[in-house]
Image (cartoon, rainbow, N blue to C red):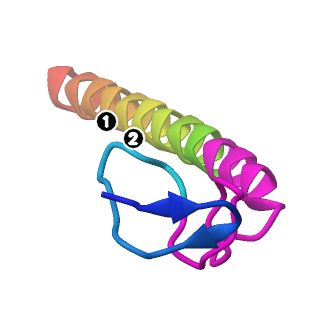
Amino acid sequence: MRIKNGNKDYGGHNDDDDADDDGDDDDDDDDDDDDDDDDDDDDDDDDDIHSIVVVVVVVVVVVVIVVVVAVLNNHTGQ
């Protein structure tokens, strides 16, 4: 629980409160930079790229397996 008297903050922390504990009246964490939103966007882009790469690799592996099985069946059938 935070106790405030005017501009003074007497510490404490409420888990439901997003305010920081640095004594000022702003509700942001001073540990976080203002460009954190950009970092989150970069993480989303990295996740999208990773997902695309995984799908492409799986498709290539399946195609290679199908081609190898078809070639082996063709050679053993003759």
Residue at the (69%, 60%) spot, across then down: 25
What is the crowding at mark 2: few (fewer than 14 residues within 10 Å), some, or many (at least 20)? few
Q: Residue furthest left?
A: 76
Q: Which residues are magenta?
A: 20-45
* Viewer-side label of 1, 2: 2
Q: Name the main secondary structure of what is drawn in magenta.
A: loop
**Residue occupied by mark 2:** 61
**Residue occupied by mark 1:** 65
- Which residue is nearer to you in this view: 2 or 58? 2
Image coords of residue 23 (percent x, y):
61, 76
Q: Secondary structure at mark 1?
A: helix
In which quadrant will I find the C terminus? top left
Q: Amino acid at mark 1?
A: Ile
**Figure check: 16 above or below 74:** below
Q: Amino acid at mark 2?
A: Val
What is the crowding at mark 1: few (fewer than 14 residues within 10 Å), some, or many (at least 20)? few
**Figure check: 27 above or below 75:** below
